[in-house]
Image: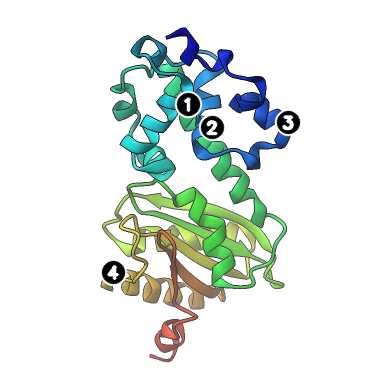
Amino acid sequence: MKSNRIKNWPKEERPRERLLAKGADKLTETELLAIILRIGQGSFKAGMLGQNASDFARTLLKDFHGLRGLDRAHVQDLLKVPGLGPAKVAQIKAAFELGKKISAGKLTALSFESSQAIANHFRPRFSGNRQEMVSAVFLNGQNKRLGEKEITEGTPTQATVYVRRVIEEALRLSAAAVVLVHNHPSGNPEPSAYDDQTTRELLKACKLVQLILLDHVIVGESEHYSYVDSGRLQEFENG
């Protein structure tokens, strides 16, 4: 129906106009998603189903269980949704990725102060990923960040595969210390026996090249596990 279209709403109620007048932080998730659905190439085709962008955004969030579920959804699953084409799916995925990159950039000038800081830095990047991702943060003698590198994605078959990659990158950067970080897609950050094995092997390799392993942090959905905070790293060193 024509009266249901957003352009027929009062100006102060339209999501795009509200964003420009009041700021993006004042909009709901539904309103923000509605703006993405309405603008640019490949605008959604739900209008032919009797929905406006806000209705369609609300339906998407419900069907995919919120923004986190929408982020985790495979492209092919989104393409099956009536009203979404390749261009619009690409815009949605790009919007999520931009948000992650902005969050990830916040550690650039920071020093390593706590496992919480590392977890907060990596959680947006890991969010929505259905596979384990292993990354490492490399630091100088003052614990200032020199760089970071994704070591592997997916479930590795041997800890030595990415222990070697960590050491190679540390030597290339002339790093003094390293923090290993990975996610648990299940959301539960409790370490597995394999995580323990990896930590032991990396600790042993670091000692051989006089590199300090500051921590191994496992990032869950809302919590994290730190081998240092738990005292396990000290146990491995003394063992």
- Label 3 neighbourhood size at 10 Å, few (<14), some (14-19), many (20+)? few
State if disc 1 and disc 4 touch (CB < 8 Å).
Answer: no
Q: Which residue is mark 4?
A: 194
Q: Give residue 197's quadrant in the image.
A: bottom left
Left or right, 99 with reference to 84: right
Q: Quadrant of the N terminus?
A: top left
Q: Which residue is mark 3?
A: 21
State if disc 1 and disc 2 touch (CB < 8 Å).
Answer: yes
Q: Position of residue 82 (x, y in %)?
A: 31, 18
Label 2 is placed on what type of residue? Glu
Q: Which residue is mark 1?
A: 54
Q: Which residue is mark 2?
A: 31
Label 1 is placed on what type of residue? Ser
What number is the disc on residue 70?
Answer: none
Q: Which residue is at the front of the view, 106 or 206?
A: 106
Label 3 is placed on what type of residue? Ala
Left or right, 4 with reference to 7: left
Left or right, 36 with reference to 22: left
Is disc 4 placed on a helix, strand or loop?
helix
Q: Give residue 60's quadrant in the image.
A: top left
